[in-house]
Amino acid sequence: MTPCVDYVITFTELAGGDAEQITAATPALMLIQLLLLPLYLWLFMGQQVAEFIEAGPFIEAFVVIIALPLTLAWATEYWADRSERGAQWQNTMGWFPVPMMGATLFVVIASQLPRVQDSIGQIVSVVPIYVAFLVIMPLLGRLVAGVLGMGAGESRALVFTSVTRNSLVILRLALALPSGYGLAPAVVVTQTLVELTGMVVLTRVVPAWLVPETPQSAPLV
């Protein structure tokens, strides 16, 4: 439903994209998507969304998943700028984002895997939609990057941020839905599995074909 703000940074860097630009844009992306999320829910579900969507889980997700980590990150930056020990701590922490993100994804996926297995017949029907999204969005992202005259690094960053979804925040909201929507978390996790597979493929396809190092030689400009 909204652009990813976590593992998209890692995949962008693996593809030689401008990961620093995405990192810098992350706070703005998160604030904008939090403002748009209620509108998305209303567009997709209508007036009935107010009957079972509670503000509590959404606020908790924002505080725990977004506000607290951002505050700690800013505090670390502040400390590192003013203390040698803080700078050492920052350098040490620089090794942790990728393994911690991997551990988080493993826990999230493992928690919903039984539901996916038990309802595979229903859930598999949405997989073609996720695959189509993975095919269409990189092409649209590359087209927009060409229109805006972006360089290779920025173009790759735009492609990856247009493809990935913020499943970890959405999953927290999906888990708060009533029993009639019990498959929603499993569907979100399925999307994550399809997306991660696609991201691995795109780390090769994007720099080699879609957005090569020389922008003018790219197929879609």
Image (cartoon, rainbow, N blue to C red):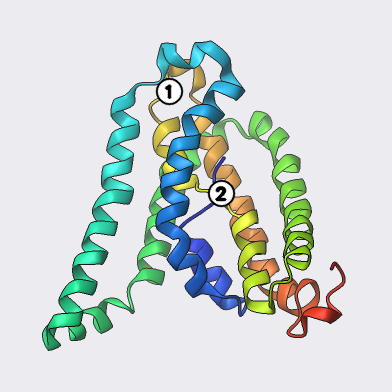
- In percent of width and height, residue 33 lies at 48, 43
Does residue 50 sit above or below 141 in this rendering? above
Task: Residue at 60% x, 45% y: name it.
Answer: 191
Does residue 126 sit above or below 196 in this rendering? above
**Mark 1 or mark 2: which is in front?**
2
- In percent of width and height, residue 20 lies at 48, 74
Q: Mark 1 points at which residue?
A: 177
Q: What type is the residue that disc 2 sits on? A: Arg
Q: Name the residue under label 2.
A: 165
Tag of residue 140: none
Q: In which quarter of the image is the C terminus?
A: bottom right
- In percent of width and height, residue 112 lies at 46, 40
- In percent of width and height, residue 47 lies at 52, 11
Q: Quadrant of residue 143?
A: bottom right
Q: Toward the viewer: 140 or 175?
A: 140
Task: Residue at 51% x, 53% y: name it.
Answer: 4
Instruction: Determine the secondary structure under disc 2.
Output: loop
Please indicate whether residue 84 sits to the left or right of residue 161 in the image: left
Please indicate whether residue 14 sits to the left or right of residue 127 in the image: left
Q: What type is the residue that disc 1 sits on? A: Leu
Instruction: Measure how far apart labels 1 and 2 are at the Cα level.
Output: 19 Å
Is residue 110 among the parts visible in the rendering? no
